[in-house]
Image (spheres, helix red, strand yellow):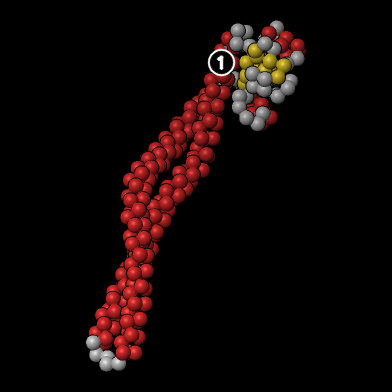
Amino acid sequence: MLSNNTEFKKLLLLHGKDRRKRTMELELSNSPNLISSIENKIDVEEKTIESARNELSLLEAKSNSLENEIDSISDQVSRLKNKQLEVKKNEEYQALINEISCTQKQQSSLEDEQLQILIKLDDARETLKIAQDKISNKVKHLQNEKSQLSDRIDDLKNEISKLDLEIIDSIKDVDNSLLASYEQTKKIVSRPPYIAPLKEQKCTGCNLRVSNDVVSSVLVEQKLTQCDQCGRIVYCER
């Protein structure tokens, strides 16, 4: 059986290392996208807090503006009342009463508006506090995830470098004719596995049924054989 052949076992060992390297390279190539995705999530969370801060700042500014306006109107009312004490004519006195009344109504309206703003301010402060507590934990988790991913990238680079050296050593051990067939298969097949066992007369690499000639070549002739569907090297495990 080909799977028991010492030289073929060496080829299977090389193939295993090639597959591990391919898997790690794919993971490494996907890592920048994953980091970018995490950074985008962090940015969204931080913008959420910034939005809550901006809303609070706008409400505070509005409240301060109303406070100044109310103080100004209050001063105006005081001046009008003082002026009342100075006028002699009834018409002027009545005109001042009307003006004071209108001004006080304006002041009352602004005070009602300020009260609503103060209620919104309390809600905005509470919202910001909740957002900061919740989002800061989420951002911390995301930053930790990003840090772990960065460490994983370093580990992958180191593992791939070590595996490259192991692959070089394994190539030296493989029979030249087997190696040539294997390298040719890697050029034909777009993705691993490049060597696949047969199961129930199907290539486990492409999951398609192989011809009787392929089965005969593997079982009877026990020679290096390729799947007539996908081009992978096939063998029987027992």
Q: Is residue 221 left or right of residue 5?
A: right
Residue 64 seen in the figure: yes
> Residue, x 49% and y 41% (percent of image)?
34
Q: Which quadrant of the view contains residue 102?
A: bottom left
Q: Quadrant of the N terminus?
A: top right
Residue marked by disc 1: 9
What is the residue that sits farthest to the front in this orientation?
Answer: 90
> Closer to the camera, 120 or 180?
120
User: Could you tell me residue 79's position as x and y percent?
Assistant: 27, 83
- Give neighbour class at mark 1: few <14, some 14-19, many 20+ (Cα, 10 Å): some
> Residue, x 37% and y 69% (percent of image)?
109
> Closer to the camera, 86 or 67?
86
User: Could you tell me residue 3's position as x and y percent?
Assistant: 59, 12
Q: Which quadrant of the view contains residue 219?
A: top right
What is the residue that sits farthest to the bottom in this orientation?
Answer: 88
Q: Quadrant of the C terminus?
A: top right
> Residue, x 74% and y 20% (percent of image)?
228
Q: Amino acid at mark 1?
A: Lys
